[in-house]
C-alpha cells in the first residue's frame, strides 16, 4: 500500500529519514541553512501561558511589516461611497444616519491574502480608521535562525526545552498565490511566544533542500517586494519591526543583570558559590528599582537569557 507523502515532519522523524541526529538539525537551523517551523493556533487563540498557574493567559498581538500597495484616493472615495449608501438605507427606514456615520462600529475593510502549501494568511485594512490587523491565518510559520542559535545547546540536549520568540516568518516555498497589491512580510509578536522542541517541524520543502546540501535562508528573498513596484502615488503601509529591538533589549537586560551581580554577588550564587541563573534572576527582580526600566520583563525569558550568560554564551 502506497501512503501519501508527508507535508511536514517532526524533528525526530526528519532526522531518522535523513540519517542524522536531531542535534544536527538544530545546528543547521542555527547557522541558517534549515528552517524549523511551528504550527500556529488561530490568531484569536494566540496566547502566552505564564508558568505561574495563578496568572491569566495573555492574548498576544501580532503585527507585520507586509506591504499594502494602496491608492489612497480611490480607497477613500470607495469608503465614502459605501458609507453614504448605508446611511441612505438607514434614512429610508426613518433612522438617523448621523449616529451611524460617527459610530465606532462602522468598518470598511480592504483584504489582502497570501497562500502557499504550508501557510495562508488574510490581512485587512480598515480605510476609515486607518487601521490594519490579521483577520486569520493557518498552517506553519518559520522560526528565524537567531532564536535557534541562542538556545542551540539546550535544544540539542532536551526535547522539552522551550525557546521564546518575538518574530516568525512565512516558510520558504517555490510556489504561492497572493493578492496583486500585497507583499507578505515577517510577523512580529508584541510579547513572547514559547515553543517546545517537541512541537517543532520541518516542511517537506525544507527536507528536500536538506538532503541535497541545504540552502541558506537569505540566499533568495522570495517575499520581499521589488523596488520598481513602488510609486509616489501609492501609500505604503508598514509597522515598526519589533524584532529589531530584540538585540538592544537583550543587551540592556544583561547590563542590568551584570550590575546586580556585582552589587549583590552572594544573592546570585548557589551553595558552591557558582552563579545560579535562578537566584540571579530572583535577585534582579527584587532590585528592579535599582536599574533602568527593562523591556524584557517576563521572568521565564529573563531566566533563559541569564542561563545563557552563566554558561558563557554571551558575546559581549
Image (spheres, rainbow, N blue to C red):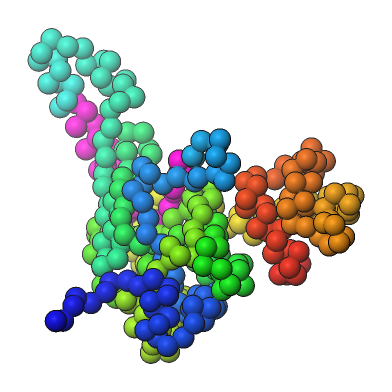
- Picture layout, residue 306 above or below residue 44: below
Residue shown at 45% from the left, 40% from the top? 59
Left or right position of 16 against 155? left
Residue shown at 37% from the left, 84% from the top? 17
In the image, 68 versus 249, the foreground residue is 249
Residue at the extreme left: 92
Decide whether residue 71 is among the magenta residues: yes
Residue shown at 62% from the left, 46% from the top? 298
Left or right position of 253 against 118? right
The C terminus appears in which quarter of the rendering? Answer: bottom right
Is residue 233 visible in the rendered image? The answer is: no
Is residue 312 visible in the rendered image? The answer is: yes
Instruction: Point out residue 192 in the picture as x, y percentages from the top left corner.
Output: 54, 50
Instruction: Point out residue 109 in the picture as x, y percentages from the top left corner.
Output: 26, 40
Left or right position of 27 against 94? right
Left or right position of 110 against 307? left
- Picture layout, residue 132 above or below residue 94: below
Q: What stretch is highlighted in magenta?
A: 59-84
Amino acid at each position: 500500500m502506497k501512503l501519501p507523502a508527508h507535508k511536514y515532519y517532526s524533528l525526530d522523524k526528519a532526522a531518522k529519514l535523513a540519517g542524522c541526529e536531531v542535534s544536527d538539525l538544530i545546528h543547521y537551523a542555527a547557522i541558517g541553512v534549515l528552517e524549523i517551523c511551528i504550527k500556529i493556533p488561530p490568531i484569536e487563540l494566540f496566547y502566552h501561558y505564564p508558568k505561574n498557574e495563578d496568572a491569566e493567559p495573555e492574548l498576544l498581538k501580532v503585527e507585520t511589516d507586509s506591504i499594502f500597495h494602496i491608492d489612497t484616493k480611490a480607497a477613500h472615495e470607495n469608503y465614502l461611497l459605501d458609507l453614504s449608501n448605508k446611511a441612505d438605507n438607514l434614512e429610508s427606514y426613518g433612522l438617523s444616519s448621523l449616529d451611524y456615520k460617527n459610530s465606532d462600529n462602522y468598518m470598511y475593510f480592504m483584504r489582502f491574502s497570501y497562500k502557499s502549501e504550508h501557510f495562508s494568511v488574510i490581512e485587512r485594512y480598515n480605510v476609515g480608521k486607518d487601521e490594519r490587523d490579521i483577520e486569520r491565518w493557518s498552517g506553519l510559520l518559520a522560526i528565524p535562525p537567531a532564536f535557534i542559535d541562542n538556545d542551540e545547546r539546550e535544544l540539542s540536549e532536551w526535547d522539552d526545552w522551550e525557546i521564546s520568540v518575538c518574530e516568525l516568518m512565512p516558510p520558504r516555498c517555490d510556489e504561492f498565490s497572493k493578492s496583486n497589491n500585497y507583499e507578505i512580510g515577517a510577523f512580529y509578536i508584541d510579547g513572547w511566544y514559547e515553543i517546545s522542541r517537541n512541537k517543532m517541524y520541518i516542511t517537506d520543502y525544507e527536507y528536500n533542500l536538506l538532503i541535497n546540501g541545504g540552502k541558506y535562508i537569505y540566499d533568495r528573498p522570495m517575499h520581499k517586494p521589488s523596488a520598481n513596484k513602488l510609486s509616489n502615488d501609492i501609500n505604503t503601509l508598514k509597522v515598526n519591526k519589533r524584532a529589531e529591538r530584540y538585540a538592544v533589549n537583550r543587551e540592556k537586560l544583561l547590563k542590568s543583570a551584570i550590575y546586580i551581580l556585582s552589587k549583590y554577588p552572594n544573592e546570585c550564587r548557589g551553595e558552591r558559590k557558582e552563579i545560579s541563573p535562578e537566584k540571579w534572576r530572583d535577585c534582579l527582580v527584587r532590585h528592579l528599582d535599582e536599574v533602568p526600566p527593562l523591556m524584557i520583563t517576563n521572568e521565564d525569558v529573563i531566566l533563559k537569557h541569564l542561563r545563557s550568560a552563566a554558561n558563557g554564551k554571551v558575546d559581549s
